[in-house]
Image (tube, grey):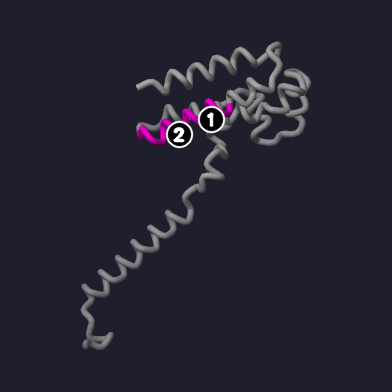
Amino acid sequence: MKRIDQVSETSRGRAAALLGAGLLLLGAVLLAPSPARAAEPTALEIAMLPPYCQARLSRDRAAMEQWSAALGKETYLHIHHYCTGLVYINRVNQTFEQRKRRYLINQAINEFDYVLKRWPPTSALYAEAQGQKALAQMLELP
């Protein structure tokens, strides 16, 4: 058996590279978003949304109060579900992996169903939510 001082520089380099690759892989696994956090939109995703969603998802209290007054408390109470549905639709348009697309589409449909069950049909966004659900269902087609 060789002593540590007898190990070649090449072997040390390989060992260091393997260790580095292993640590990189471990970091990627540990930092990957968990399913519970997968729905949390990034700042860029929030910026792509309508202003009432930006206010709600960024938790801007003053803007939230303004939008609640404009859209109605009943609608704004559940708006984060609608906004999350929009985030899922945007993510669908950014992925080609079929399994992930199906998951995102189903999540979007669930979010739109949630608001359609809770918003009054007279809500300013009710028809838009119906349209977004229909879009998600069309994306579901092969």
The majority secondary structure of the magenta stretch comes to helix
Location of residue 37 by image quarter: top right
Q: Is residue 132 left or right of residue 92?
A: right
**Which amino acid, mark 1?**
Val
Percent across and percent down for residue 120 are 71, 16
Residue 110 on the magenta segment: yes
- Say above or below: 38 vs 32: above
Which residue of the protein is positioned furthest toward the front in this rendering?
A: 117
Nearer to the camera, 34 or 1 = 34
User: Which quadrant holds the C terminus?
Assistant: top left
- Say above or below: 72 vs 107: above
Nearer to the camera, 45 or 34 = 34
- The stretch in magenta equals 97-111
- Provide the secondary structure element on which disc 1 rests: helix
Residue under the image location 73 percent in, 29 percent down = 64
Q: CA distance from mark 1 to mark 2?
A: 13 Å
Percent across and percent down for residue 106 are 49, 29
**Which amino acid, mark 2?**
Tyr
